[in-house]
Structures are given as structure tokens and as C-alpha cells.
Image: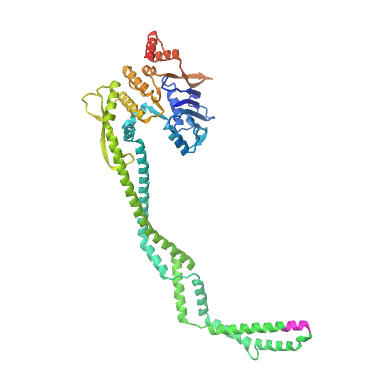
Amino acid sequence: MITHISIQNYALIQSLEIDFNKGLSVITGETGAGKSILLGAINLILGKRADTKVLLDKTKKCIVEGTFDINSYHLSGFFEKYDLDYDSSTLLRREITPYGKSRAFINDTPVKLNILKELSDKLIDIHSQHQTLTLNDTNFRLAVVDSFAGTTSTVEDYRSDYNLYKKLKLKLDELVSEEKRLKTEQDYFDFLFNELESANLTEGEQLKLEQEYKIIEHAEDIKNNLYLALSTLESEEKGILAALSSVTENFKKIESFSKKLTESSNRLESVYIELKDIANEIGNLEQEIIYDPKKAEVISNRLNKLYQLEQKHRVKTVEELISIRIEISKKLKGIISLEEKIKKLSLNIEGKYNNLLLLANKISVRRKKISDKFEKEIDETLGRLGMPDANFRIDWERLNNLSVDGVDSIRFLFNANRGGELQDLSKIASGGELSRLMLAVKSLISKKNLLPTVIFDEIDIGVSGNIADKMGNILLKLSKTMQVIAITHLPQIAGKGSTHYVVYKDIEDKKTKTVISQLNANDRIIEIAKMLSGQSVTSASVETAKQLLKN
């Protein structure tokens, strides 16, 4: 249950502190006094969106804090899930900065807004007059039935599996689309791969072939120059080797006369040996160089093939062509792998669908099983609210396909008059009838939900007199098992509260602000008397107020 609310710098609220008690608390006040502002502030700690428009002082941040006694609600698992400090007296805080930044805290630990909302949804249910519109929403209707049938947790499990199923379906669609795209290119990839594969590409071959082709292409020039070099070195009359040999022999004769002569003789001998070796190598090269037009044609054709492939793939080397061949091979293997992945995923999806269908059917059976009891209890509650002839029924329709709620779609059928034709309540129910119907629904499911706190925001709209008194009795009955806070404009309901607060506007420093105060016994009499007769309190209205409080 909520034990304390603190609001700073929100709308017309400068600073406000409220303590709440068990049972039924009522909040009253003139229209425009700020009751909706109070509810708006509470909505902040429930994870609702907000912006800087809520700031009273645009230079300061807005802070809303709510203290909750959660000792009896088995929420330790939630705190363990998000690694939060558990305390039986838990504090939820929301801050809105002047720059529009929103921050949320649980027991002073910063959390994401969705985590704050997840916890607050387990603590407070706000029921407003506008919520009657949700009676026309099939998702809300099913949520109501699930709450009464005790299938809410099962439906949550179903939805979790259903969302996973939808994600897998989306993934399958993406894979099928990718496969379709790749298969349109498969023939082209096959052609490219086979062309490169049949080329028998070898790393380094292009450079080797280019060098070999140059030699064959210039074989005659190379051979002539090698012959001239060899002649210059080995000619018997004018050859370099013959002359060097003579010089070497002369130095052999005098090398023993000095160390320097010996060194020069040795160097000449080394040069002679090196030149002799070079001459032999030149001779071998000259013999090896052969102009072979057939071989030149073979090499030229091979190079042209490589150049064409390189130009086609916009690269410059054989190594790059080999890399492209490897990539194309991977793509072709990927298509085969994709087919296998699609097949495997399809089987997985089929299995999940069958499991979902089985679970959805079980949920549907459990829902329909309580249908008669649900309808009967709604009719009985409406009777206590002054609609003895009202007739409420659930119209079931089985969907052709699975939905996030299962296989059921339902309508709430209603008629306020005996013997009247049942129609969708959105078409025939008045505002007052909707309010009473919504309270009947809420009173039914609140016993199942076991929520710590329910806030009713002017649920009594469109009703008065004896019906308002009966509505108050239902709220009072609910407050025996949970904390109920009712924002009301009816004295009959206000008189049922064990704690009474009044919201009013005050002027301070020429500025209007919203204030809330807890009333004592005497102040309650005056407040209810005002609600009965307006601002002019009469002795009759005071006596009536006392009677309402007494009852």
C-alpha cells in the first residue's frame, strides 16, 4: 500500500506532503482545485511520460516521491531480477529537470523508466472515468476475463512465446527474401566461379609469365649481346681474359718481392677467376636463349586470358582474382547453407505454432468456463447499484489466426432494461451506466488481482443519490481487502471514507498554488455539508453530513 506522497514543483503544487492510511481514503475539492493535478503527479512515479510543462518553477526540477509498504506482496524476486536493494518500505522517485531530462529511482538506485513502471504496476491500479472507454477495447475485455479466470500469468507466458514466434516469423521472411534475391544471382555466380576455377589460377604466375614473355620476345637482341660480351671476354687475341691471364702471370713472377705485390697478384687472380666464371655463365645463357614462337604464343594467350579476367573484375593481379573466386565460392555455399537454415527455422516455427495453438486453446477453455459466473456476478453487482433489470453477457468469437491474446475475441453485450435486446455496450450504455458497469467489473477483478492499492478517479460520474450510496458501499467493501483511494465529488461516497482529504487553491505571494489537507472530524462535517448544499452551509446540510458520516 502507499503510505506517503511527496510532490515538489509540479504544476500548481509548490510543495506537498500526504500520508495515506489503510482502508478507504476519499479526496474531495471544488472543480479546478487540483485533484487531477494530484493524480498527474502520482502518474509520474507510475512511469507515465512528462515534460517541462509540468514544472511550476521552470528553473527548478520537479520531484515526486511515493513510499510503499510492500512487506506482504512477495516482490523480493523483482528486486533480485534487477539487482535492486529490497526494503519493505520502498521508495519510488521521479525527477524532471528544467532541461526536460527524466530520471527514475527505486530506493535511491537509478533505474530505467520501464523498470519503474513494471514495479508500480504491481502496486497501484488507477481507475479513472476515462477508463470506461477501454470497455470497448477487446484487449482490455480479455484482460478482465483473464483476471477473473486466473489465467493472467498463463496468458503472459503465452504472449512471451507468441512474441518470440513473431520474431522468428519475421526472421524467416527475411531469410526467404534473401534466398530469393541470391537465387536470382546464383546462375551468374556459378558462371563466374566456373570461369575462374577453370582458369587454374596460381599465385605469382602472372609476373613469371610476363618476365618469360619479355625474354622470348627479345631473344635475338639478348642472344647477340651475350655473344658479343662472351667474345670480348674470351677472344684469343684481344679477349679480356687472355690479357688478364698474361698480367696475372707477370705478377706471379714478382709477387715474392714485397707484401703489396703479393696482395695485388692475389687480387688479379681473384678477378680473373670471377671473370672466367661470368664468361661461363654468359655462355650458358647464350645457349639457353632460344626464340620459340609457339611458346611465345602460348604465353601470350595465357597472359591475355589473365588480363581479360582482371579487367572484367576490375583488379590488377592474379592474387586478387583468387580472392574473388574464394568469395564467390562462399556465396554459393551460403545459398546452400541458407536453404538448410530456412528449412530448420521453418520446422522450429511450426513446432512453436503448434505449442502456441495448444496453449491458446487451453486458455480459451478456461476463459469460457467462468463466463457464466462472471456474467452472473456482474448482473448482481449492477443490481446493487440500482440497475436490477440490467443484463450483461460476453459474446465469444474464435479467431481464424493466433493473436497476441490467443484465439479469442470478445464483446461485452449489455442492456439496462428488462427484456431489451443485448447490444454492444458502446452503442447503448450511457455515461452513468458505463461508470457503474466499470465499477462492477473492477470490484470483481480487484478481488482476484490482490493489488495493494486502487485509486478511483471520479468513477461516480453520472450517478447520484441512492446509487451513489451503493457505489460507496462497494468501494468500502473493496477497502476491507486493499487500500482504496477515491477522488469523488459526491457526499454519499465522501462520507464512507475512513480518511478524508480536501484539495483547494491558495494564494501565496500573489501566486496560486494547490494544497491538500487531511480533515479532522469537525472539518469533515463542514466539507460534506458544502458538497451537499454548495458553499452556503446550512443547518440541514450539516445534519445530513453528520448522518452520512454516521452511516
Q: Observer-nearest residue: 394 or 225?
A: 394
Question: In the rendered view, does 154 fall on the left or right side of 22?
Answer: left
Locate the C terminus by quadrant. Answer: top left
Residue 235 percent coordinates (x, y): 63, 89
Magenta residues, dominant SS class: helix
Which residue in the rendered view is the most extreme toward the bottom?
237
Residue 423 percent coordinates (x, y): 24, 30
Q: Is residue 48 visible?
A: no
- Is 47 magenta? The answer is no
Q: Quadrant of residue 403?
A: top left
Q: Is residue 60 above or below residue 233?
A: above
- Residue drawn where x is 29% and y is 35% of the image: 367
Q: Observer-nearest residue: 72 or 433?
A: 72
Q: Observer-nearest residue: 534 or 348?
A: 348
Q: Is residue 208 visible?
A: yes
In magenta, the rendered stretch is 258-265
Question: In the rendered view, does 287 fall on the left or right side of 415?
Answer: right
